[in-house]
Image (spheres, helix red, strand yellow):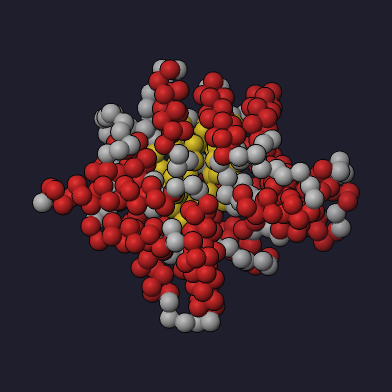
């Protein structure tokens, strides 16, 4: 049930942390303090991974700390409780089965089937806005890389791949097709997440195939565009033109990006042009330009702004006002990660905008690579930990005064 629209104010920590108890606030505070310590963030994840692999009794500690703050649960049943609780505050969820590391066909099928299950679950629950999937969760990375090289060389994939490789790729295509077909049947859209640049062309190809096949008059399938790449704004412009020409609605999640250091290091090591923007200003410029472009084409584009940036979030609300769009316009969604930027998510939800939290889930040990990556990303985003800590301190002071 939608709440009446209210004035938007990202400094309102009472609304930002209304879903957290004092104990949960303290837990988040100490986690962000630890994540903000460079040396601890550098060695902590490695020690944690080693401890879990060695069978040391640390699972309980992880589940009560990192996992509790940043994950929705170990199963769909556990995430349902989190989703329903968030929905009380007009914040929906994006279900993300975040298990990584299944590198065989049986594991790939298991991951794809679990993603299908998230869509089957979402179809009956208003609180679920989207499901999400990473194609590397059910495909061999070396295969995706090889196909990209063939595409860049202008070669035909079907003619150049060996029989076994072609069969493997058809299984990948079959998995993503089943996921997208289920999204349509359940009327729960699915994001195809972006990944590293050296396999992204293959992912783009599959995402475009699925959007053309399944979107029609509704964007049940959405691709992801990472604006920290200097070529992505032009790619987005081309996507809009292509989807219009082919007559299907475009679904797109616009993000800044998650693999900056990895991309830069690889480009330097292998001697090719760095696909990353020259700096944060260029990334911010292209991200905001992407928002403008999508709003200009909002009758045709369904956009999710996946950002922890206050200025970009406010810009999108201003663009909506300029175009006379309602706060809850069905083509526009704001999204942040669970456990981060609550001042954006909950204040947007309170003001009547479509807000959602990415809700990763899966067994603790299997989700650890995801959690470690999130911790690393947190330190790479300038001021993220300190901003979270400042907001938490403000709310602590407010609650003390209220007593």
**Residue drawn at x 24%, y 43% as measured from the top left:** 14
Quadrant containing the N terminus is top left
Residue farthest along the left direction in this orientation: 403
333 vs 204, left or right, is: left
* Residue 321 locus on image (x, y percent): 40, 20
**Residue drawn at x 79%, y 54% as measured from the top left:** 270
User: Can residue 144 be seen in the rendering of this structure?
Assistant: no
Work out whether 178 lies above or below 368. above
Q: Nearer the viewer, residue 186 or 146?
A: 146
Work out whether 79 lies above or below 278. below
* Residue 118 locus on image (x, y percent): 48, 53
**Residue drawn at x 37%, y 27% as measured from the top left:** 327
Q: Report which quarter residue 143 is drawn in.
A: bottom right
* Residue 172 locus on image (x, y percent): 69, 54
Q: Nearer the viewer, residue 6 or 132?
A: 6
**Residue drawn at x 85%, y 54% as measured from the top left:** 161
Q: How many marks?
A: 0
Q: Report which quarter residue 11 is drawn in.
A: top left
* Residue 217 locus on image (x, y percent): 56, 28
Work out whether 243 lies above or below 201. above
User: Can residue 95 be seen in the rendering of this structure?
Assistant: yes
């Amino acid at each position: 049930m939608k709440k009446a629209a209210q004035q938007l104010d990202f400094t309102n920590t009472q609304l930002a942390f209304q879903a957290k108890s004092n104990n949960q606030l303290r837990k988040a505070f100490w986690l962000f303090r630890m994540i903000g310590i460079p040396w601890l963030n550098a060695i902590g994840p490695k020690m944690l991974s080693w401890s879990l692999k060695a069978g040391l009794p640390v699972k309980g500690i992880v589940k009560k700390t990192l996992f509790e703050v940043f994950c929705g649960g170990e199963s769909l049943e556990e995430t349902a409780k989190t989703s329903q609780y968030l929905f009380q505050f007009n914040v929906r969820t994006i279900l993300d089965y975040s298990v990584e590391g299944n590198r065989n066909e049986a594991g790939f099928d298991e991951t794809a089937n679990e993603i299908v299950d998230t869509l089957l679950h979402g179809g009956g629950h208003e609180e679920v806005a989207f499901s999400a999937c990473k194609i590397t969760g059910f495909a061999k990375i070396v295969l995706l890389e090889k196909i990209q090289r063939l595409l860049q060389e202008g070669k035909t994939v079907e003619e150049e791949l060996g029989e076994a490789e072609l069969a493997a790729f058809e299984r990948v295509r079959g998995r993503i097709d089943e996921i997208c077909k289920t999204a349509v049947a359940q009327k729960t859209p699915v994001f195809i997440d972006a990944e590293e640049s050296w396999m992204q062309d293959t992912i783009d190809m599959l995402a475009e195939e699925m959007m053309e096949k399944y979107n029609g008059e509704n964007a049940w399938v959405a691709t992801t565009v990472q604006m920290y790449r200097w070529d992505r704004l032009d790619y987005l412009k081309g996507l809009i033109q292509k989807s219009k020409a082919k007559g299907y609605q475009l679904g797109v999640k616009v993000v800044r990006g998650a693999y900056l250091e990895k991309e830069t290091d690889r480009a330097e090591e292998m001697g090719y042009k760095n696909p990353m923007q020259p700096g944060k200003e260029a990334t911010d410029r292209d991200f905001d330009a992407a928002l403008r472009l999508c709003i200009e084409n909002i009758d045709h584009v369904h956009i999710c702004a996946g950002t922890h940036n206050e200025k970009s979030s406010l810009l999108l609300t201003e663009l909506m006002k300029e175009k006379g769009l309602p706060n809850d316009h069905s083509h526009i969604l704001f999204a942040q990660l669970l456990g981060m930027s609550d001042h954006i998510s909950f204040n947007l939800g309170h003001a009547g905008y479509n807000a959602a939290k990415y809700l990763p889930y899966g067994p603790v040990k299997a989700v650890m690579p995801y959690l470690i990556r999130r911790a690393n990303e947190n330190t790479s985003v300038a001021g993220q930990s300190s901003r979270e800590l400042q907001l938490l301190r403000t709310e602590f002071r407010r609650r003390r005064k209220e007593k």
